[in-house]
Image (cartoon, helix red, strand yellow):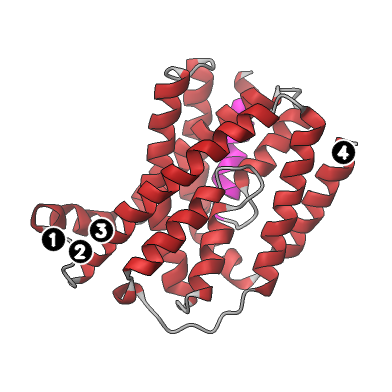
Amino acid sequence: MLLETIVMGILQGMLEWLPISSQGNLILFMASLFGISEVEALNLSVYLHGGTLLSSLVYFRRTFWVLLKSVPTYRYGDQKKENRLITFLVLSTLLTGIIGYPIFRFAEATARFSSFFFTLIGASLIVTGLIQKWTKKFGTRTLDDVNLTDSLLLGVVQGFSAFPGISRSGMTLSFLLFRRYNSESALKLSFLMSVPAVLAAEIGLSLTNGFIPLDFWDVIAGCLSSFITGIISINVLLKIAQKINLWMFCILIGLIAIIFSF
């Protein structure tokens, strides 16, 4: 299975930067092309996000370093930019966990019924595509304007992305644009909030399912390939994500998944 996890890691490293649900697409690929069980594919897809998490940390290292230095002097309610951003990341991550955990467990339960699981992934991809289609880019807000409402709303939205097919980046970007953020700030906020959320998901999965219940070295190889591919591709693919409407791709893959399930 080593070769398969490396290939999936490479795909994760590319798809993570596009608003098309890397998790949903990876599960469809793993199950249909490599014959990996849906439950195993679901768990592996979460671990492969560890590689792109490291890519995000490297890419946004200056921002995270500034936030880390601000932690000792952090005060809730302080209107300083760094404090507002820390509050946003903490609250959105907590809500993501509260909403996302039962949704992920539901995904695990439905993964045992292949046809139903594929149908739900397909429907989720279609919903993701339609929301992106209806999103308008006309905002003027920046990172300096982050508030409590943004933290709560985006935490809930990100929580729903625990189900494969609901694109985390696609949904959070759409709702940040709906909240009238400009494209650059929306993109940065979306990927900043992914880091603590993915880290929490990795830890939570390890605690509840045991530390990497899959083959350890296969998972490590997959994460390494997703990290390397993510570092190489992040600049190009983030620019593509801003310039090209990918909602049609989501809908197309969603329809194929539903047809395949029958």
Q: Is residue 85 left or right of residue 153?
A: left
Q: Amino acid at mark 4?
A: Phe
Q: Are the residues tagged 3 and 1 within 8 Å (C-beta)?
A: no
Q: Are the residues tagged 2 and 4 within 8 Å (C-beta)?
A: no
Separation of marks 3 and 2 at Cα, in angstroms:
5 Å
- Asked if residue 14 lies in the magenta stretch, the reply is yes
Picture coordinates of residue 45, whole percent (x, y): 57, 34
Q: Secondary structure at mark 4?
A: helix
Nearer to us in this view, 40 or 56:
40
The residue at which mark 3 appears reads as 86
Q: Amino acid at mark 1?
A: Arg
Magenta residues span 4-17
The residue at which mark 2 appears reads as 83
Q: Amino acid at mark 3?
A: Ile
Mark toward the viewer: 4 or 1: 1
N-terminal-most mark, 3 or 1: 1
Image quarter of the N terminus: top right
The residue at which mark 1 appears reads as 75
Q: Are the residues tagged 2 and 1 within 8 Å (C-beta)?
A: yes
N-terminal-most mark, 2 or 1: 1
N-terminal-most mark, 2 or 4: 2
Nearer to us in this view, 233 or 254:
254
Image quarter of the C terminus: top right
Separation of marks 3 and 1 at Cα, in angstroms:
10 Å
- Asked if residue 61 lies in the magenta stretch, the reply is no
Main SS of residues in magenta: helix
Separation of marks 2 and 1 at Cα, in angstroms:
7 Å
Q: Amino acid at mark 2?
A: Asn
The residue at which mark 4 appears reads as 260
Picture coordinates of residue 192, whole percent (x, y): 38, 56
